[in-house]
Amino acid sequence: MKRQPPLVGIIANPISARDIRRIVAHAGNMQITERANIVLRLLAGLGAVGIRHVLMMPEKAGIRQHVMRGLQRSLNLGEGRFPDIEYLDMIVSSSSQDSINAASQMREAGVSAIIVLGGDGTHRAVVSACGGVPIAGVSTGTNNAFPKFKEPTIVGMAVGLAITEASLSNIAFQSNKILEVDVSGHKEIALVDVAIVAEGYIGARALWRSENFKELYVTFAETEVIGMSVVAGLLDPVSRDKPEGRCVVFDNSDNPNYLLRAPIAPGVIEEIGIESWRRLLPDIPIPITEREGSIAFDGEKELSFSKNDRPTITLRTEAFRTIDVSACMKFGAQARLLSNNHQKLNHQKRGSI
Amino acid sequence: MSNNTFPLSKEELLKAYRMMKTIREFEERLHVEFARGGIPGFVHLYAGEEATAVGIMMHLDDQDRIASTHRGHGHCIAKGVDVCEMMAEIYGKVTGACRGKGGSMHIADLSRGMMGANGILGAGSPLACGAALAAQKLGHKGIGMSFTGDGASNQGTFLESLNLAAIWNLPLVFVIENNGYAESTSVDYATAVDSYVDRASGFGLPGITVDGTDFFAVYEAAGEVIKRAREGGGPSLLECKMVRFFGHFEGDAQTYKAEGENEYNRANNDCLKIFRTRVTEAQVIADDEFDAIDTEVLALIDTAVEKAIAAPLPTAADLTSDVYINY
């Protein structure tokens, strides 16, 4: 395939939504065939607004085979509604590293946007490597705070409009906050939350033993999500665009100041003891109070720390860009971006634009 | 030494390491002994996959029954089968766990809940269903544990077992040991939907995937699926992604693997190294304590081989014993 702008990248990492929350909670499992179907709907949406070339992340769980079969069937039927796709030439490790490598390669290839299928973890991996390239997310799990579930066809169309319509450039993109964690010089980011827990091992990564929760830091906190950030959301919500976050201190004693009922995992509502919460202001490194334990990024434990490490957490604003699907579609409707070719769209009323 | 924040006591950590190291050295030694021509029949080595067997078996006791595979040495050792009896069995000697009649692919020890390695791919899952049904009917808290490779999970027996376990809500865990190759065929090619979690979903069962090279990931995940089965929560599936250091069988030229793949895995995906590094960095166990275990394990394997070589072969008269019942 000859790469011609505007290029769009799609990262669908099959490892998302496979963790222990299917056992310790009632988290769903989006099957591989459904993920492939989502990719096809994204491609159809992109194709409908004129995107002709898409770069894809390769994987080894079968999404690619199902997508290729779908494209071939469409070709056989003479539909011609999908863009050309090209798979990146990269070694597949079947881990989140694939998302990082793919995002990095896509950025170098000059994509105008990356569409991400996955949960908070996959989005976090992509953001760590996509640089200034805007992303659009499609949630593939029930345990996600960052990506919302939107119909992929619409996401594809909105992304296509955002990167091809100059008139949309002022409203199509939103800037987002991150949390930056520094553990003895080793830096990691989180898009939604950083949780400090007592257990010093990483294990199966997921968080569900609320008796071990110590501290929580969030970039934003909504009330209708599942996971750690809802704890802050149910105490003191803060929106995605406000330049502040929240910090919550847990209290696992018999007499906490507050007892909060929080849906920390799908189907799991725990009573959690809270000592206090406060605002988190940008660009000020906050030292973690706990001396040892482990740090979970967007719901997954990843790093252990001991008393010599003294980790710090800093809220950063305008850290990466996302595509505002609703704004793009609304503008598209108002500006008649989808209704300006009356012959092709077979409109009854000529000259309605 | 620091506070131990691992989910196991120091003694349990040492026990887990000893078990993994025993499996590793057992297999490394068989690799050499097989090449020397001292071992009858085929052997399929478990080296590289130890964290899975041990991470799971640390949660089991003798009343829990496991159905193993053709690559069963690791399961046997982790389930508590005597290492000397195993080695003698592989050498085909009367002192073996099955009096030398089974060999590598049929080592069993019912007193330990080890129902047997199994030369028939996919044959273990229905046996594990039977063990789980027995536990359910007898009302004790034992569970059945089915081990299946990525290739054998395409067998009808495995899929039928998922169905049976689901409808009877059996206290059972299906473990998929996904080392990427069904004999020499890549999982990418041979399995229509490569996610084994999706297989479980098709039968309404929960399934999860863990990094099988990370002992602590396996240990924690296995603890939850086993607890669920034991307490009446029903069957589930645990996929462990792992690497095997040797070929499908000893003598396999492994032309289907990428150049340098085994060396890469030994350098970067060695579950023993990963375990040891993590525990020593956390300052819970010192290197010299691990080194002492290494020495003891090597001595045990030496003894096992020496005893096996010295033991007699079965006689012609042994052919007619243990045919129906005796053992």
Image (cartoon, helix red, strand yellow):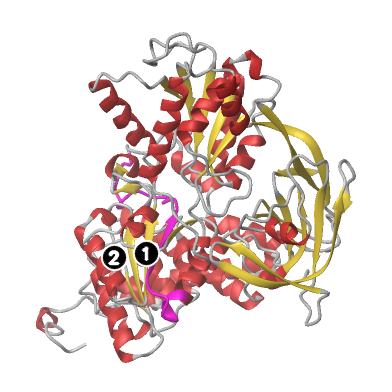
Q: Nearer the viewer, residue A194 or A186?
A: A194
- Quarter of the picture containing the N terminus of chain A is top left
User: Which quadrant of the view contains residue A224?
Assistant: bottom right
For the residues labelled 2 and 1, say whether their Cβ atoms are less than 8 Å apart: yes
Three-letter amino acid code at disc 2? Leu
Q: Residue furthest front?
A: A349
Q: Position of residue A152 (x, y in %)?
A: 47, 35
Find numbered disc 2 in the image and state the secondary structure of the residue it sits on: helix
Q: Is residue A226 left or right of residue A90?
A: right
User: Which quadrant of the view contains residue A196?
Assistant: bottom right
Q: Are marks 2 and 1 on the same chain?
A: yes
Q: In this rendering, is residue B156 above or below B185?
A: below
Label 2 is found on which chain of the structure? Answer: B
Q: Position of residue B156 (x, y in %)?
A: 20, 59
The residue pinned by badge 2 equals B162
Q: Main secondary structure of the magenta part?
A: loop
Q: Nearer the viewer, residue B147 or A8?
A: A8
Q: Position of residue B219 (x, y in %)?
A: 53, 67
Find numbered disc 1 in the image and state the secondary structure of the residue it sits on: loop
The residue pinned by badge 1 equals B205
